[in-house]
């Protein structure tokens, strides 16, 4: 199974040894739709290996939720000014709400539920000027 391979691989790098994988974790992994494909599985597995301290590998159930935890904040902000229709408008609304900050807990990436590096890439690709949102 692919998850076993990743657990062994990342455990070896972290100097850890897991005797088994939690049954609930296996069911959770099998039932998840994996919108990020194999890279998402790798990231979740690596993060879990780092944070697990016992002999049984387990994944925090909240990491595989279907709805990003911060998405409603952007939606509620956007609906007050009319719902954004494009990716550019959604990103600009998140940047406005976070005063141009991309990373960290209150940044636009957290509000959108995406990694800061991904959001930075999209901002550059769409040629959005983050500085214009810093003082709004």
Image (cartoon, rainbow, N blue to C red):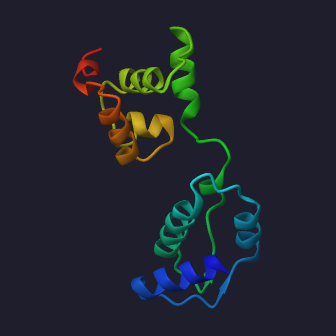
Q: Is residue 16 above or below residue 61?
A: below
Quarter holding residue 2: bottom right
Task: For the C terminus, give its image quadrant.
Answer: top left
Residue sitting at x 74%, y 66%: 30
In the displayed image of the protein, which residue is found farthest to the top?
A: 81
Task: For the N terminus, give its image quadrant.
Answer: bottom right
Q: Position of residue 53 (x, y in %)?
A: 52, 79
Q: Position of residue 44 (x, y in %)?
A: 54, 64
Q: From the viewer's perspective, is 57 left or right of 86?
A: right
Quarter holding residue 79: top right
Residue sitting at x 37%, y 20%: 96
In the displayed image of the protein, which residue is found farthest to the left?
A: 131
- The front one of 123 and 29 is 123
- The front one of 64 and 2 is 2
Q: Is residue 30 above or below residue 104?
A: below
Q: How many marks?
A: 0
Quarter holding residue 20: bottom right
Residue sitting at x 49%, y 35%: 112
Q: Position of residue 39 (x, y in %)?
A: 51, 62
In the displayed image of the protein, which residue is found farthest to the front?
A: 125
- The front one of 22 and 12 is 12
Residue sitting at x 29%, y 27%: 127
């Amino acid at each position: 199974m692919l998850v076993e391979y990743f657990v062994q691989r990342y455990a070896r790098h972290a100097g850890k040894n897991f005797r088994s994988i939690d049954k609930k974790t296996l069911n959770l992994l099998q039932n998840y739709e994996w919108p990020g494909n194999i890279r998402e599985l790798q990231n979740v597995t690596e993060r879990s290996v780092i944070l697990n301290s016992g002999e049984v590998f387990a994944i925090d159930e909240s990491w595989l939720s279907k709805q990003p935890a911060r998405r409603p904040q952007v939606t509620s902000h956007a609906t007050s000014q009319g719902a954004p229709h494009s990716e550019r408008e959604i990103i600009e609304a998140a940047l406005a709400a976070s005063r141009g900050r991309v990373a960290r807990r209150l940044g636009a990436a957290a509000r959108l539920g995406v990694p800061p590096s991904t959001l930075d890439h999209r901002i550059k690709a769409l040629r959005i000027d983050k500085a214009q949102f810093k003082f709004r």
